[in-house]
Amino acid sequence: MLEGELIENRVNINDKEGLDLYDENGYGKPLENELELALVEAVFLLKKDKLKVFSTKNNKRNFWKYDDFYRYASEKEPEFHQKFVVYSDLRERGYLVKTGFKFGAHFRVYERGVKLKRGPKAPHEHTKFVVHSIKEEDRFSYPELSRAARLAQNIRAKMVWAVVDSENDVTYYTINRFTP
């Protein structure tokens, strides 16, 4: 089982197997000799028993229990619960899911079966969906919808709103920009 160290709002895995996790399953962001996981990825892997997360204090490793780590992530990141529900749902459906900060959304999602690789990509290896998770009671404006759809269209992706209800079920809505 892999071990990763919590550093603020990231979990770093400092061995080759961490980089293999990126190459084989698309988790995290590869750095020189380590893999950096977002909190949502780390919580997902911890829940699946594929990762142990620890913090170092006084040169001693203290390992996190799932519930405590989930609570920590929820305190560190706004909207963590709904992001985690959507991330988990997409991963369980076989999609490769990455953070989508630079697109103004929570996630960018790739076709099923795509393996991330460093360097140039074939057309089918590019982002397919830009996904933003919201609670069913959230409100937003038409300009927000339009802006999101336009940003997604600029990278030839579809904008998807993932609505999480009170029972943690997810409904996906695609927003398309139409220009007559």
Image: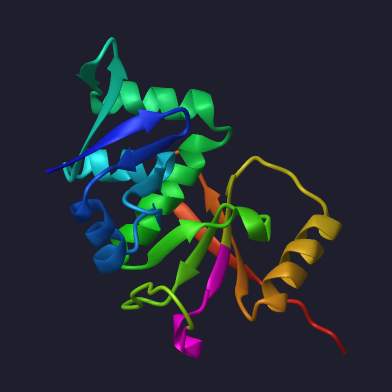
Look at the image and say whether residue 26 sits in the magenta stretch. no
Which residue occupies the foreground of this view, 171 or 44?
Answer: 44
Query: Disc count in the image?
Result: 0
Q: Position of residue 134 (x, y in %)?
A: 60, 46
The residue at the point 65 percent across, 57 percent down is 102
Name which quarter of the figure residue 142 lies in.
bottom right
- Whether residue 178 can be seen here: yes
Q: Quadrant of residue 178?
A: bottom right
Q: Residue at x 67, y 71 (%)?
A: 152
The magenta stretch spans which residues?
A: 121-130
Residue in the foreground of this view, choosing between 119 and 134: 119
Residue 138 rendering spot, x and y as whole percentages: 67, 41
Q: Classify residue 147 as left or right of residue 73.
A: right
Residue 145, above or below 13: below
Q: Is residue 14 left or right of residue 158?
A: left
Q: Position of residue 94 (x, y in %)?
A: 31, 67
Q: Position of residue 161 (x, y in %)?
A: 60, 59
Front one among 30 and 66: 30
Q: Residue furthest left?
A: 1
Q: Is residue 57 above or below residue 72?
A: above
The colour scheme used to paint the residues is: rainbow
Residue beneath the point at 50% across and 42% down = 82
Q: Specify the quadrant that holds the N terminus.
A: top left
Name the outermost residue toward the front.
Answer: 32
118 and 43: which is toward the camera: 118
Residue 123 as seen in the image, left or right of residue 160: left
Q: Residue at x 27, y 43 (%)?
A: 14
In this view of the protein, can residue 168 be seen by the observer?
A: no
Name of the residue lying farthest toward the top: 58
Check the picture and name the quadrant holding the C terminus: bottom right
